[in-house]
Amino acid sequence: IINGWNSLFAGSKLAAKSESLSFISLVVVNGKAQARLSQAAVEAKNAKWEAYAIVYVIGDTPTIAAMGRHVEKEWNFGSKPTIFLHDEGYFLIRFVSKEDQDKFLFSGPHSFYGVPIVVKK
């Protein structure tokens, strides 16, 4: 049945991005079923988020274009970071390097055109 599930996603965007699906057996702990990931799998996923920051503008959420203009104007990076807007009103900023992320995180306090922003790693 596992091969049957994998075949459902053949040719999908996930497959095109080299993302693979695999089955993880559940383990029952205190009567609750849990999926157990290997330490290597956890470390690989953590590494993916190593150069991100979460940014929340207090008050109204600006557009992603406005945030992009602000980042370019206020924070001078060698390479332009990628900005994502979450449905709940905060931004994820993916920096090109860990050094750019650290430069951003340690250069605060930050504001968005005078409005305070919350920044988290």
Image (cartoon, helix red, strand yellow):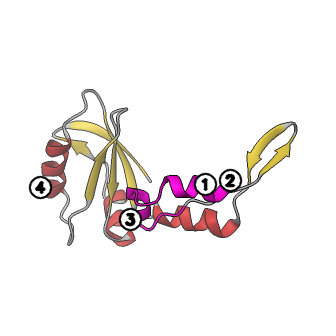
- Sequence-wise, the earlier of marks 4 and 2 is 2
Mark 4, residue position: 73
As displayed, is residue 119 above or below residue 114?
Answer: below
Callout 4, which amino acid? Lys
Residue 52 occupies quadrant: bottom left
Provide the secondary structure element on which disc 1 rests: helix
Tag 1 near tag 2, CB within 8 Å: yes
Residue drawn 20% across and 43% down? 64
Q: Nearer the viewer, mark 3 or mark 1?
A: 1
Q: Disc number at residue 16?
A: 3
Horizontally, residue 98 falls left or right of residue 113, namely right
Report the Cα–Cα distance between label 4 and label 2.
Answer: 53 Å
Q: Nearer the viewer, mark 2 or mark 3?
A: 2
Q: Position of residue 19 (x, y in %)?
A: 48, 63
Q: Quick one: label 3, few (<14), some, or many (20+) residues within 10 Å?
A: few
For marks 1 and 4, the one nearer the N-term is 1
Callout 3 secondary element = helix
Q: Mark 2 and mark 3: span between their CA atoms?
A: 22 Å
Q: Which residues are magenta?
A: 1-20
Amino acid beneath label 2: Ile
